[in-house]
Image (spheres, rainbow, N blue to C red):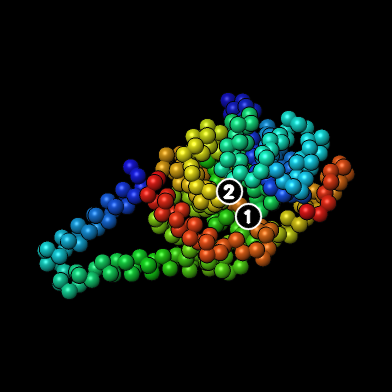
Amino acid sequence: MEQRKEEKNKYSIIIPTYNERLNIALIVYLIFKHVRDVEFEIIVVDDGSPDGTQDVVKQLQQVYGEDCILLRPRPKKLGLGTAYIHGLKHASGNFVVIMDADLSHHPKYLPSFIKKQLETGASIVTGTRYAQGGGVHGWNLMRKLTSRGANVLAQTLLWPGVSDLTGSFRLYKKSVLEDIITSVVSKGYVFQMEMIVRASRKGYHIEEVPITFVDRVFGSSKLGGSEIVEYLKGVAYLLVTT
Amino acid sequence: MKHVVKIMALLVAISSIWVGLLQTSIIPHSHTWLLPIYFVVSLGCYGLLMVGIGLMRFPTCPQEALLLQQDIIEAKEFLKQKGIDVGSD
């Protein structure tokens, strides 16, 4: 019985891209290297990258097959949430994986996501950078401090039931993703928080797997004052509306 | 039930215990009046403690950066062979 269920599962991996012409090729190679004996498709949602990302994807389609790599572009940068919704429309799998295109999320963890879901029957498996076995590279002390502070604040106020709220490396049952994503209004990383908190409130079974996160945007401080304000507003919003 | 309602209920419960303590005299009044301050301060200390502990135990993975570099080289080799344009990004 278990064998038959596994064979019927298909995983749609949605990767939003913007100017990732090199990384998309690398990530596709790594996905094919690490995800074995499992039916999957990769859906690239490119927001009109000027660097030729879509051309590279078309070349990849020649190598790996157009049924395995779907290119579903959009005319311009329209935001992450809508990118997932757009990808969902073209997803033929019963499971959906979302991940970043810049190799901060390594495809070698995909089998552990899949395995965790099969073992536990969870609706959502989310990658956590903060648990034993996980980790981060490329963050300075300030970055770690703000991450830790933000996490403690969110844990105290929201009781989310997951250790990593802003992570965007996740496996969802397709029906669950469709259910939650329609009620989410936030943007940016607060979007990821809202997704997982709403899922938690709705009582969906959520599991975590440790992942490592190699921040490749060296030196760029993505955490300015405005980001912190945005985060606090996001937590307040989630506190009151979920 | 919305989450904020749960938190409010918790605060109401704690407040009523405090008011109860004020009315009966189990604890001397001088202490009772200060209880909310103690509560807020200990909450703050707890938060700082959690941040400090978390910071000390923050998991890092420097070896992953190396592994990633190796993966990138391997990937570029393969992709070049297949004719995919892997010029610099």
Q: At label 1, which amino acid type do we have?
A: Thr
Of helix, strand and loop, which one carries label 1?
strand
Q: CA distance from mark 1 to mark 2?
A: 12 Å
Pointer 2 local density, CA inside 10 Å: few below 14, some 14–19, many at least 20: many
Q: Nearer the viewer, residue A21 or A117?
A: A21
Residue topped by disc 2: A168
Say whether marks 1 and 2 touch (CB < 8 Å): no
Q: Which mark is residue B39?
A: none
> Against A219, is A154 above or below?
above
Q: Chain of mark 2?
A: A
Helix or strand or loop: what does disc 2 sit on? loop
Residue A193 image offset from top left, x and y in percent: 50, 49
Residue at point 66%, 57% (across, down): A214
**Which quarter of the rendering shows the N terminus of chain A?**
top right
Residue found at the very far front of the displayed protein: A75
Quadrant containing the C terminus of chain A in the rendered view: top left
Q: Is residue A125 in sight in this rendering?
A: yes
Residue at the far bottom: name it.
B30
Decide which of A22, A133 is in the foreground and name it: A22
What x and y, as percent, mark residue A227?
Answer: 53, 60
> Relative to A212, does residue A54 appear above or below in the rendering?
above
Badge 1: residue crowd in 10 Å (few <14, some 14–19, many ≥20): many
